[in-house]
Amino acid sequence: MGKIKETSTNFENKKVLADECSEVYAANIIGGQWSLVICSWLTNGKMRFGELKKSIPNITERMLTMQLRKLEENHILTRTVYAEVPPRVEYELTEIGYELKPIILQMEQWGERHKKLKI
């Protein structure tokens, strides 16, 4: 997963569109299959890294780490490290992260209805 060069036209177009369109801004934060799945699991409460990994079997540890960092950077979740041996780390949605719960549920329901369409 590479970053878009900040000097590229694509980067500038995405930035302008996100600044003018809140839907695009939101999609940029939670867009992508892994972020949405991680948020979906965390709507049920705190989870440790290993629990998330087991819940999302096809994600690599590297990708899970990258997505958790991105979600933390965007204030969607918090990472709490406990001073124990071995160290215990828990991830939990922030207040604004928990606001995604009804949106994720609606997306799930919409997805189920859309799957049934014969295109």
Image: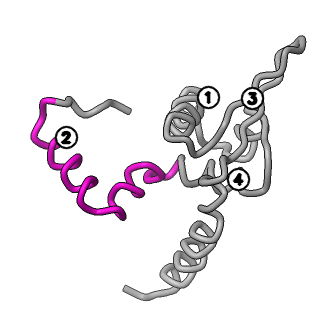
Mark 3 vs mark 1: which is more N-terminal?
A: 1
Residue drawn at x 62%, y 52% is 39
Q: Disc 3 marks which residue?
A: 80
Kind of element beneath mark 1: helix
Instruction: Report the mark closest to the observer, 1 or 2.
Output: 2
As measured in the structure, the alpha-carbon distance from the residue carrying label 1 to the one carrying label 2 is 27 Å
* x and y, in percent, of residue 103 in the image: 57, 69
Above or below, comparing residue 111 to residue 67 in the picture: below
Q: Disc 2 marks which residue?
A: 11
**Extreme residue in the left direction:** 9
Instruction: Report the mark closest to the observer, 4 or 2.
Output: 2
Mark 3 vs mark 2: which is more N-terminal?
A: 2
Over which residues does the magenta segment extend?
7-34
As measured in the structure, the alpha-carbon distance from the residue carrying label 3 to the one carrying label 1 is 18 Å
The dominant secondary structure in magenta is helix
Q: Judge whether residue 114 is colored magenta.
A: no
Query: The disc labelled 2 sits on which kind of residue?
Result: Phe
Question: Which of 34 and 28 lies nearest the eye of the viewer?
Answer: 28
